[in-house]
Image: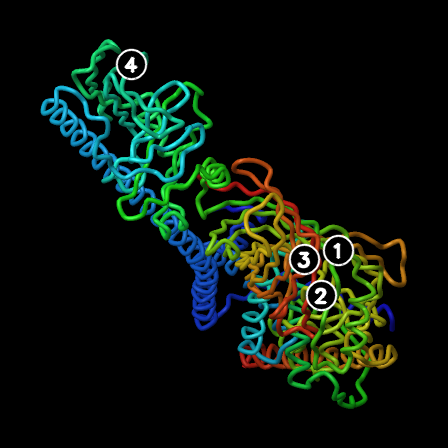
Amino acid sequence: MEQENEIVDELFRKAIEPLEAEPSEAFWKKASEDIISKTAKANDKKASRWRLIAFICAGGLVALGYFTFRMQNGLQKVEQQVAVMKKIQNLNTEKIIAEQNKSATDKEVAPATLNAPQINTEKPAGINTTSRDGYSAKTPNNTYAYNNRNVKRVSSAVATHHQNPLSADANEGDINAGQANEPSRVAVQENSNQSISSSQPSSSNSQNLLQIHTQHGLGWWNDFEKYKDALTTPAAKNNSQVITPPIAEKAATASVPATANPTNTNTVKPDSTALKNADVALSKFSASAFFSPDDMVGYNFKSSSPYANTMENTIRSGEKEKFSYAAGVNAEYSLSSKVSIGVGVAYNSYSFSIAPCVVTAQMQSDGQVGYSLVTSSGVIDCPNYGTVYTGQKLNMSATSSRSYISIPVDIKYYFNKKSAFRIYVKAGLEPNIFVSEPTTMNWQNYYYKNQQGSYGVSYVDGVRDIYLSGNLGLGLEFKAGKYFSLFAEPLGVQGAITSLDKNTPVVSYPMMGNATLGITYHFK
Amino acid sequence: MDVSEQQLIKGCLEGIPVFHQMLYKRYASKMLIVCMRYSNSREEAEDILQEGFITVFEKMYQFRMQGSFEGWVRRIMVNKSLEHLRKESKIYPIQPIDNIEDKFVSPEYVLSTIEAKELLKMIQELPPAYKMVFNMYVFDGMTHKEIAAALGIAEGTSKSNLSDARKVLKKKIRRNILMEEKIIYYEQSGARE
């Protein structure tokens, strides 16, 4: 009987196994339709992903372009102002020279006093005093600084009026005659490097000499770029105050640039803070690089499955974080002295292990019977190399690492204005674009322990292409140099707003803690 | 174009339509027979084959180039056939078998008399429960324990279904042979007359 059964089996095997049957036309038609739709779907998926990346890049470029445009526009305005000021200064210098020459011609002997232009009421550093009749003070090396009445802010070239044999007595504020032992010269240097100079013996008393102290004046102008921000500070604009250049920084022998304001003679001393800031006048635009070791705080789950609690507990207790981090770059724009907005790109990686557990073969979403692991990222189907039947079991452990490209958009609020240390809080949103989740599954036959192996799986069923998270953080920024600052955000939290996965037995909302370290470059 | 199995799989994974077509052409004929063994008709088998190929493409990334790809595709087709029968609730009803004479002729004689396609048809005509067990045991090399686990039946049921399936097939073969012999007889006697 047994033998006859084997004969029957063998008969059918021999007859049928070599058989082949050509599918019908209808089958081939369906197959080609399937291939076309599959290709179109794959292309659509690829295209939509690239569209998204392109959209984000384009947005970033537009933002960058806008900030650059604003910066350039600002610089152009400053340059225009500087050019106008130079022009006015040159014109006035010429005018003063002309007036003085005229006056000298009219009067063979210089008067004791001149119609003085408006002057500084406060002396710049290094200047002894200001004359009561409007003439400028005397510097230690016997040079004189005049305010130019028509120059609104700063007169770079300094006109010093000598009337030999007159000389200015600094202590009395008068210009006295008969003190002619100081050098007498005229030196007018235009910005175009053309110079008019003449020198006369100190004994000459036939002419008023106008001394233009190019040594300091134009030299300072050449450095104007360096100080233009200080000159255009809101305070300076609003008060129409005049900020004199940093005389103290110049050589002790240098003459003094005078400043004048036709509407407001309130000239201030060089503001060391302003000058210091002017030294490092920076753009509102900055770029940062950061690294952040992350730590999984926990998950929130949502599920409609009757086994929800079991699955959630399995994930909570089974998944152990190995190492996670985020690294990236960020561009920041200061909206005000205390508020800034930033956008960046970061690579996030979260690695975890799944503790050994028993998985039972069951019908999967595609109708196949097989093994699958429910993880926080979604469902990972295990590849089957043999026919698997419902109810069969495996011991399974796994390691996995999911990675995302994130686009953090944050707003920062600094509690204090510019200083060496600044404390801030930040809040923002972060779309996370799924990159990959390679998983290694180590299996062992539940009944036959010697049967074991490992699978590499790169697909997670149900994982979202993009999920959204929110960020909160508290940080400290330390100014480490002219252009660089270091920052640390020891208290950062990133919580998922949308779930990591969808259409899975359990959807997960992870919450990560992070401690960020980074460096910022502040653009000039 | 002569393309190796590895190249074919790689091409399919990259989503190149030509390789999809090649995969269809290479395995469709063989796999159709597998599906036909489990189904009642050719049309039904083609539907299962189509679904099976879709699964093959979807799950191809899971194939790790270890073992036979054809074997892997075949298993998918078998699983699809089982799934199809489950959906149609065709597995569980077991029909009683009449007492069949347990006498059988030699395989050589059967093969010389009956075409392979006829034998395939006999399997297709089996009651679903017998058909499943017979296919899984004879063609797919599964044990009764595995069959029982896969179909959710007792091991003893699997054994009895297999035994009954054999009886039915033997009966069909005998009838078929008798029919053939009668035809031959009438043809020969007609020729004599």
Residue A492, labelled with which disc?
Answer: 3
- Tell me which chain the residue with mark 4 is part of: A
Residues at discs 1 and 2 both on one chain: yes
The amino acid sitting under disc 1 is Phe
For mark 2, does the 10 Å Cα neighbourhood hold few (<14), some (14 to 19), or many (20 or more) residues? many
Question: Which residue position holds label 4?
Answer: A180
In front of the other: label 3 or label 2?
Answer: 3
- Tell me which chain the residue with mark 2 is part of: A
Residue A46 on image: x %, y %: 47, 58
Which secondary structure, mark 4? loop
Residues at discs 1 and 3 both on one chain: yes
In primary-sequence order, the first of circles 1 and 3 is: 1
Q: Quadrant of residue B123?
A: bottom right
In front of the other: label 1 or label 4?
Answer: 4
Q: How far apart are labels 1 and 4 at the CA level?
A: 89 Å
For mark 1, does the 10 Å Cα neighbourhood hold few (<14), some (14 to 19), or many (20 or more) residues? some
Q: Is residue A291 above or below residue B107?
A: above
